[in-house]
Image (tube, coloured by chain):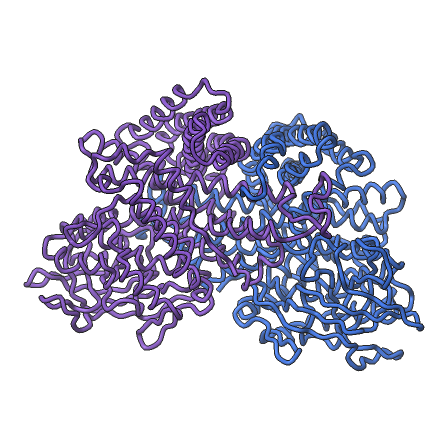
Chain colours: A blue, B purple
């Protein structure tokens, strides 16, 4: 039976020592977030994740959601756990106090998301999607919509969804057929069928608030004719009471590889009443508020899967006795040594550990920037943070889920044959983690978004700011011998990233296929440099504390050792990415489609 | 519904043009293998795989094997298909004519194995394991054992298994507890419990011949006290009739991630009668005959999974309309272009295609060497082939299954959300392929076998022969401009492999952890160089035929383009492997076990 322990100590090290969130005290939501309060919240979040959500993870997978007569039943225990989630007020953690939220910074929510997704990814998706719907309505919805939906979405009494995909179009939303017909009262009648709707129907809440992309009758073709609507499953009376069904029904649920505890629904809208969010034909903008938040959330799922799989692999590697150390018995009074003595097992574990700790830093660093975008004191600061989020969102989504999945596979491998058996739970982590590379924009789409859209925006301003930040860090820390491996590695990675960017500038304009051909490698190259930068920051902070003999010294030393491993073993991949990028698109485009 | 088409044309190109099997006409089994006969067999093998086995692949996954009252029921259709396999005589393809086999070279069997595993991996495992049992008995068993078991194993009327693993020991067989007590009649009473026994119990055959590792009472501890026994599930009368149960029973079957159509059994031997194969306490040697064959078979499974997943991804990429080419609409009369216009989709597909074709060459090249080991005319030739097999077996097992699995994941990704849904069948390929990295020695063990055992054997003779062969090829083909990219790439890879080997020589003796720390990277580095060499051979053959305007010219041109892609995109990874190897073991070993 797998176990899980939330990495609260690591989060506190990052928030307090590396990212130093006290610097952001001038931002509204941070003013309340004292180290003591944050610590207390993280403790409670850990407890809820470990004790309420995690024990339901395997049963959720084995039972799955059941569909009958239009209704979806979640696995045993999900309702009780969800009710506890609502009662404890977790849904309001980072929500607007005006509507009943606690108003804490999103970075705290990001930490909780990681714990929750590690504990039970399928379960955590229900409130995760609700938060996305909350964000779209609060940022783009009118006052009436906010008043009608936001409070219940904050408490979690109602849940939310995103209805985008149709059977013939996923990525290319411009092909969408769902239509909206304006009514005299300002509402719309929505008709169409959506597929792959996570949490589209379930038994956890009394109402489900669907956010639906549709084309208003007569609007132009393509994505410029798309609008976003709030379509509650059940109509809501003026007094807030939940009324009759709004011609919204679940047609079926999918049988899928994993996340069995989360319902994936075909949703039918048969003249359902919907209300416009934001402006007509500007649905993509509102949708992207939800989508960008969802992409960060999915990146966190990649990290979360990697973390929980890692913890269980470590436990197994310390318990399982097989063979002897190559340098002589380490456990001579037993018949064999624990397999953690073997370098190849340590390599496997450190590949994961050194990723997890840097990925956590990258998530929290970026979550702070997301707070700055919303609440930063001056326009320059907000704009710089917005640049950062544009650039880093596809990287977090794509790289953390690709490597997160890879790490679940590696952790499963530590178990040998037992890793392949359901009861051990490792193969569930693999199956669950796999979806994160696909949904909310498949990772190839993230790479193209990065290279084709985010990189060139404002003349490459976002990347230049990133380089500037890295360079300032390098200049400030170059004297220290302990940190040399970090600086050398980061410098080399940064140089490769710059070369790759230059190559795109020289070859991608004339032939965009050259940019497309290198996009996935570029995303991963960027990811390594960003993670390498996080390691360099963490190592500097750890070193500073060690010099002062402050804090848990062996924790800090291990932090530096883990980072050193990252630099030695993961950073060299940047050179291979660069070589692939520089090979361009000629060969791959020269093969006729029928020759594949 | 997934489809499959056996790559017969590719196999014929390899056998006739690249590997030139007519050169081996002096070897018994090859003398019959004329191009026409081989072609006819491949056609029939393709037909059987595509029409009989493949249609049962999804039903096998969905139904799985059922266990009740000690009996295992295979999925619907498996019995009929298996009977057809027996009737068509597939089991005898490469078996000894003295016992009723057709005596064809193992390279033909390897091609059939690929087709069968692509079509239905879970089904193909039943006869695959039978062939392993056949090989162990025919090479190490006495005349009586051969007469009693070989004919029925060849026809497939009886099936075989390998019983190695116990719950507390997989890799470290020396810890084994199953015991064998000598009886007056020369037989042994076998008592113990084995786990993870593929095809341990099922309803396809009237008897199951278990090959069981056990310790003869009083034998020394560790692997030097292990012997190998034939233990039929049902006792066999002198006239060959299948009699009563031999105290062999299946206790349960595992619920696992994939290969649901193949039973994975807990096997109980309660004083079962067994007969020794080979000498007492020399069980590991006989077991390795089976195991090495099984490892090649598992490597083939990696390739096979990659191939069938690839074919379905190509079909989807040609059908699915989403978005537009970056260089302008390619399908202007439709609402969107097929996704194969996108460079990132082509990258994904070519990563797989360029691996598959080289992996197929590596498998067939090595299968020919396996034939030479058994039947080569002179001792030098046999010994060189044996060196090759020692070195290449862990590479084929480890690299083809690691990359094969990775490729099933990549192919699944092409389908977007549909790839995650069971009915599309792509996620089954991923789940099935995953086991190949684990069983018959987890891939980390393959890497250690390569670096710790196979590489240093006979003073590194095997590797030096490999380098010599590569160098001769490079020298013979260096003048040709078309082939330059192949030679440059291969030369660079070969140089990295040599550097890595030197590094081990300098640092692995003093501290074996340095070899262990780099073992997996070394295995993959070796794999890339071996695959790169295959590409260089294929490109030279294709070029020679193109120069003569002989054969299917566009097939040959596409072959060279695909190989060029491999050189540009996959070979650069050798440098990253080398850098990781050269970083050594210091950092990973310096972390205390409790600090993970």
Q: As drawn, is A172 to the left or to the right of B68?
A: right
Residue B88 position in % (x across, y down)? 28, 59
Residue at the (36%, 50%) spot, across then down: B43
Q: Is residue A386 above or below residue B202?
A: above
A118 or A522, which is in the foreground? A522
Q: Position of residue A407 (x, y in %)?
A: 54, 49
- In the image: residue A199, left or right of residue B148: right
Foreground: A480 or A300?
A300
Q: In which quarter of the image is residue A277?
A: bottom right
Residue shown at the point (61%, 45%) measured from the top left: B345
- From where the camera sits, is residue A385 visible? yes
Residue B122 lies, in percent from the top left, at 39, 60
Q: In the rendering, at what x and y percent does residue B121 appear? A: 40, 57
Q: Is residue A45 left or right of residue B160?
A: right
Near-viewer residue (B2 or A201)? B2
Number of labels in the image equals 0
């Amino acid at each position: 039976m797998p176990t899980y322990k939330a990495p609260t100590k690591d989060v506190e090290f990052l928030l307090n020592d590396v990212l130093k969130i006290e610097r952001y005290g001038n931002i509204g939501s941070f003013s309340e977030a004292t180290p003591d309060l944050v610590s207390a919240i993280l403790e409670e979040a850990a407890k809820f994740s470990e004790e309420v959500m995690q024990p339901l993870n395997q049963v959720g997978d084995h039972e799955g959601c059941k569909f009958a007569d239009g209704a979806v039943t979640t696995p045993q225990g999900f309702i009780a756990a969800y009710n506890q989630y609502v009662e404890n007020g977790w849904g309001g953690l980072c929500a607007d106090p005006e509507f009943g939220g606690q108003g804490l910074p999103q970075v705290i929510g990001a930490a909780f998301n990681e714990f929750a997704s590690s504990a039970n990814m399928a379960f955590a998706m229900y409130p995760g999607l609700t938060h996305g719907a909350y964000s779209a309505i609060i940022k783009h919805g009118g006052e009436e919509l906010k008043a009608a939906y936001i409070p219940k979405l904050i408490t979690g009494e109602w849940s939310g969804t995103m209805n985008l995909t149709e059977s013939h179009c996923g990525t290319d939303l411009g092909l969408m057929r769902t239509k909206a017909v304006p009514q005299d009262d300002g509402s719309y009648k929505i008709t169409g069928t959506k597929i792959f709707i996570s949490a589209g129907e379930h038994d956890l809440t009394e109402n489900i608030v669907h956010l639906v992309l549709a084309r208003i009758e007569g609007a132009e073709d393509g994505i410029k004719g798309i609008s976003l609507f709030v379509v509650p499953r059940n109509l809501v009376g003026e007094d807030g009471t939940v009324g009759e069904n709004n011609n919204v029904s679940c047609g079926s649920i999918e049988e899928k590889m994993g996340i069995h505890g989360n319902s994936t629904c075909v949703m039918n809208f048969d003249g359902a009443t919907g209300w416009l969010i934001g402006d007509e034909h500007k649905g993509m903008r509102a949708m992207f508020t939800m989508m960008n938040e969802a992409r960060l959330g999915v990146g966190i799922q990649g990290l979360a899967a990697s973390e929980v799989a890692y913890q269980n692999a470590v436990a197994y590697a310390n318990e399982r006795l097989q063979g002897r150390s190559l340098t002589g018995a380490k456990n001579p009074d037993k018949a064999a040594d624990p397999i953690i003595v073997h370098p190849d097992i340590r390599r496997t574990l450190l590949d994961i550990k050194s990723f997890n700790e840097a990925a956590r830093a990258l998530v929290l660093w970026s979550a702070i920037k997301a707070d700055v975008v919303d609440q930063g004191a001056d326009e320059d600061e907000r704009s710089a943070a917005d640049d950062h989020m544009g650039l880093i969102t596809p990287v977090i989504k794509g790289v953390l889920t690709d490597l997160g999945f890879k790490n679940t596979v590696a952790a499963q491998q530590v178990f040998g044959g037992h890793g392949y058996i359901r009861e051990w739970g490792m193969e569930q982590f693999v199956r669950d983690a796999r979806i994160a590379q696909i949904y909310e924009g498949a990772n190839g789409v993230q790479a193209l978004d990065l290279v084709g859209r985010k990189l060139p925006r404002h003349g490459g301003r976002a990347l230049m700011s990133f380089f500037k930040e890295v360079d300032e860090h390098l200049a400030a820390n170059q004297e220290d011998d302990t940190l040399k491996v970090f600086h050398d590695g980061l410098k080399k990675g940064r140089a490769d990233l710059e070369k790759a960017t230059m190559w795109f500038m020289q070859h991608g304009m004339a032939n965009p296929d050259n940019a497309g051909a290198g996009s996935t490698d570029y995303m991963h190259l960027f990811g390594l440099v960003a993670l390498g930068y996080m390691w360099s920051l963490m190592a500097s902070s750890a070193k500073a504390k060690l010099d002062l003999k402050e804090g848990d010294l062996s924790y800090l030393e291990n932090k530096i050792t883990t980072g050193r491993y990252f630099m030695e073993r993961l950073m060299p991949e940047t050179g291979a990415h660069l070589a692939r990028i520089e090979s361009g698109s000629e060969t791959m485009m020269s093969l006729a489609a029928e020759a594949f």
